[in-house]
Amino acid sequence: MAGGTFDKLAGKVRPGTYINFVSTRHDTVGINERGIVVVPLLNHNYGPVGEFIQLTGAAPDAQYAKLGYSIYDNDPNRQMLLIREAFKNASTVYVYRVNGTEGVKAKIENEETPTLTVEAKYPGTRGNDLTVAIVENPTGGFDVSVYLGGSKVSVYEGLENVADLAAVEDDYVTFTGSGALSAQAGLILTGGTDATAQKQEVTSFLDALERIRWNTLAFPSTDDDLHTAAKNKITYIRESVGRGVQVVMPDTKAKDYEGVINVTNSVKLSSGPLTHAEACAWVAGVTAGASNTQSNTYVAYEGAEEVVDPKTHEEAVAAINAGEFFFSVSEEGEVVVEYDINSLTSFKDGKDKTYRKNRVIRVFDTFAEAVQLNFPPNKYDNSPDGWAIMEGIGKTILRQFADAGAITNVDYDADFKVDQSLSQGDETYFNVGLQAVDSAEKLYFTIATR
């Protein structure tokens, strides 16, 4: 009976039992999952400054203490709205408070108990909504409760003195001091102030993007200089760092690039209209959440009742030719994405019109990520045996993409080959062929009448 190992792509000729031993460690062919959005909070009124805060669809309010709000709250600067819109399609949202560090923390120094000081954990005017109540515990000591916006967020029971309270690690306030506690109906924190995000701080945020893995950046700024900085950073991350990311910006002049999605109108929700900048959060979420076999053309905007700044037919044609991403109304009356395209309009340097299609870009980006994941440095020998192994892995990646419907017309013998004439020393060269599958979005019928 025949035996030995087998190649899934080649199979075997003779009947027999063939066994491959496969490690369960992360050495297998695969691609990174999508669905990760970054949303900078340019005007938020609470929380740590200059820190990425990870939110997940499974527990979107898990970071309430750092945001100062539930994502379902209507905060005065509408920052939670951005998170909600991104989460309509994203699985993970990273938020980052950009506000300047000169913001002040709300604070109270209790006149009746001068040895107790209570200070908000983070700067911002939301800290002025923090209060502390101290009541006697019937069994001894005092119970101390912290409230945010009238809701109790933490409580500590049976404390004997200020030192006990100062030892508490609370998520909302910091207690300091010493001496005796006394009953207080409500200690109101005051003096918290916000700081306006400066351009240098936004630039620092853009630089920090290299520290985390993500797919799409919602950039709800209307500043042309910041748009240029964002485009430059996305270009650097795509072309120098090698990550397939995109940025979504409103009415931007920093365009004509497959890494930039230019949103030029918006929608009205039941709660009111969104600005073009606010709509970028939803676009970033739906872009990150789409796989490399999905297009967002004619995808409905959940919760949208009408289009804000709708385009006429002539305006829509001009907008598409200009590389704009916008909303329209379908035949069924739904608010939908007109055309899932990015801002690329100059088709040169090896980029044809397919590069403006976001589904195609997702194919290219996820393929590049799969190659990076499976071909780290110093894993394979740069020799005929090593080349055979690498080509086999490459063919398996092609098979995955073809089976998923992301690519077509695959020649497994020619579309992932080591260039043996150039590969020597520690340098290995590959020639890869890839044809992405696009969606049928323009349907032409010729009908012969009789």
Image (cartoon, helix red, strand yellow):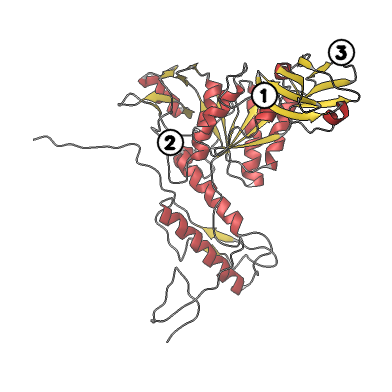
Q: In percent of the image, x 8 and y 35: which residue is there? A: 450
Is 361 left, or right, of 212 in this rendering? left
Between marks 2 and 1, how big is the CA–CA gap? 42 Å
Which residue ends up furthest to the front in the rendered image?
Answer: 139
Q: Given the image, on which type of amino acid does mark 1 rest?
A: Lys
Is 367 left, or right, of 106 in this rendering? left
Q: Secondary structure at mark 1?
A: strand
Position in image of residue 93 (x %, y %): 59, 35
Residue hosting label 1: 152
Residue 28 in which image quadrant: bottom right
Between marks 1 and 3, how big is the CA–CA gap? 23 Å
Labels 1 & 3 near each other (Cβ < 8 A): no
Q: Secondary structure at mark 3?
A: loop
Residue 317 in view in this figure: yes
Q: Is residue 20 above or below residue 348?
A: below
Position in image of residue 84 (x %, y %): 54, 28
Residue hosting label 3: 112
* Viewer-side residue, 267 vs 227: 267
Residue 184 in which image quadrant: top right
Residue 42 in view in this figure: no
Residue hosting label 2: 296
